[in-house]
Amino acid sequence: MNKAITDGVLLMPPAFQNGLDVWSSEDGTPGSDTYDGAPNAVLVASDPDFGNCLELQKTVSTQKLRYMGDTPLLPGCYLQIKARIKAISGNLPAVRIAAWAGGAGGVHVSGVTEVAGSTTLTTYGEVVEITGIVGAGTRGGVDMPWGTAALYGHFGIDLTGATGGVVRIDDIEVIDITSIYLRDMLSLVDVRDYGAVGDGTTDNKAAFNAADDAANGRRVLVPEGDYHLGGTVTFVSPVTFEGTVNMPTDKMLLLTKNFDFSSYAAAFGNEELAFKKAFQALLNNSDHESLDLGGRKIAITAPIDMQAAVPNRASYATRRVIRNGQLEASSSPAWDTEVFTSVATYDPSDPRTLSNVANIATIPVGALVEGNGVGREVYVRSKNVGAGQITLNAALYDADGTQNFTFRLFKYMLDFSGFSQLSKFGMSDIEFQCNNRCSAIRLAPTGITFNLRDCFISRPKNRGITSIGGGCQGMLIDQCQFLSSEDALDVSDRITIAMNTNANDVKLRYNRATRFLHFAVLAGSNSMILGNHLFQGDTVTNGVRSACLVIVGTYTSSTISNNYIDNAHIEWTNEQDPTPTNTGGFSFSAMSIADNIFLSGDVAPWFSYIVIKPHGANHFLNGLSVTDNRFRSINGNIDRAERVDTSFADLDFTRSKNVTFAGNTYHGIGAQVSNPLRVRHTEGSTAKNWDVQTDGELPFGGRARGVDGIVALDEITNAAGSTVYSMPYVQLERGANNDNIRLVWEQPVQGEVSLAIRIDK
């Protein structure tokens, strides 16, 4: 690049022979004294070395010679000032290139270097060439770096040292040497050419912006050094970082043409900081919808407060995705769980509030709540310190009154809870390598359609995904693997939970989870659990098994289908009901469990695959469909596939409604239940009353409350051997457990019938 050639910029000062009225004996500024008619300056016409030249006698301590014209200094350009000089007589002076830097409006630019290195003349008649380079940037060989404030200069030389000597000076040259600083076919624009200084403190925002403006599609280079940016910088050109940048937390670096983690890692020189700044940019620029980690492993040393990384965003609801990489928790005390205790009061009439909380200022939002009558996965959603109140994500089932509560603050690799709302946010193809040091993700308190796809959550210390509020509304967890840190522990010793939810419309599809205490604790309704492989066994003979799915709530309107449930069970409970005794008309309602594989081995005989656990009296089944499942127990039979956990209360089987339990297969299961239950009954001798047994094969040990039909499988005959064509009537709920029926005929008869007996009406 040569501006004199490409743009016709006039750089070269006129020859001395054209007149000395443009050559100043001061700084070269308008109105300064010139050498025109000066007694110590004369033009020489035919010097043997220079031809026409200027002969000058040094009369002051610093004899200045400056061209008074405004020689432009364009951003990105570097000028070389060159002069040839020889001593003629008298004292031998020193000589140097010198200049005066001018800015907008003719103002002197102070604080910049305006002289080059000095050379002392040692021999009369010897021609000495002196040079100096001036430009915006601090580059190798640049004597006078002026930054971007200087727009022009008055260039020339200084004579220093003893006075009285006479020298002759050839015409001074100013040439554009920018080309020696350009790389590879002019494809790079160096930020130093626009005044950037990599000293760690100088604010380079203006220089970076100027370089980006000048790049015009070329690549911008940030060379070695530490460049401070005092404000937000947006690059519309691609950028290469050989050096690093530093900037305040609330200022952003927006790389619109190469927005990826590798670029931010190069820019900030620290992977953890780079991830925060890249996430900050992700939520602050419309030019990119996703952050590609480029397959990189990022070491995380402490929980990342994702909202604190984006101070200008308290909420966000535009689709954004982080993809393709691994986040690994490094050893650090920052991951340690914090434990707090406090006395508080609970009133079921205000079911999601703890009041009169002692030391409430110390209780952190997002902490797990433990205490008498507190169900699983109850968290501090928010708090009001002034009022002494904590808002919970869920109600407590039996905590009326005042008691001591424990609050456990788990530490999460990515913590979104600082956002008031986060919607349409996704992460895909990422492994969260927790290394049994931390949990993985804590969601925002509100938001919709958080999406985790094709990810691994590996060895979390306490939790995989935690929802402390409604940030799980419509959450999508697809094709992920959840690998427990407690694989070697027996079921009874495990504490980790892969995820919990509080809101509606959650979809868990085609995931795999191994050996957690629970895979998912799901509150809310309208959940869809499809195609997952959930394994929670151990090697203990006759061992206990925990629930892989805990469905919390009575009216769920949920579907569990096509899953492989291995050495685990489904638990359906109402442990987040502040008044758990049922007084309404719904109770345990609207659940479909279909086309699943249930397998267990080496389990206690009382183990069951489907368990309903009421926390209060008067609950009943009101819309349950269990169809086309495959139940199998190996290495020991179990009593039944389904049961009621009566630790707190039993179901009221006098109210069962709309129950279908059909098309299932059983292997190694004692009671092969169905509803309606087909029973073949043979009466070998004549009797008016036939007592028909169900042998415990009605679902959940329910009552025989209905008969769909009675079919005679052969002749029904009386004592005389005559065929009887009349039908019997049915007496329901017979026997000690109310699970048998009686057929009452008009006369004593014998024969065989088939019946369809129901637990519901």
Image (cartoon, grey):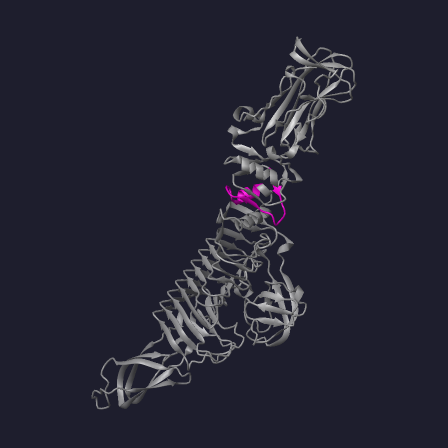
Does residue 141 show up?
A: no
Q: Position of residue 535 (x, y in %)?
A: 46, 61
**282 to the left or right of 80:** left
Q: Is residue 202 above or below residue 637?
A: above
Question: Residue 585 in magenta?
Answer: no
Question: Residue 261 in magenta?
Answer: yes
**570 to the left or right of 393:** left
Q: Quadrant of the N terminus?
A: top right
Residue furthest to the left in view is 722
- Please report the residue visible at 45 percent of the width from the left and 59 percent of the height from the top: 476
**63 to the left or right of 336:** right
Q: Is residue 122 above or below residue 362?
A: above
The quarter of the displayed image where residue 82 is located: top right
The quarter of the displayed image where residue 113 is located: top right
Q: Position of residue 310 (x, y in %)?
A: 58, 52
- Please report the residue visible at 61 percent of the width from the left and 53 percent of the height from the top: 302
**511 to the left or right of 255:** left
Q: Is residue 145 above or below residue 711?
A: above
* Magenta highlight range: 243-266
- Please report the residue visible at 21 percent of the width from the left and 88 percent of the height from the top: 721
Q: Position of residue 73 (x, y in %)?
A: 61, 29
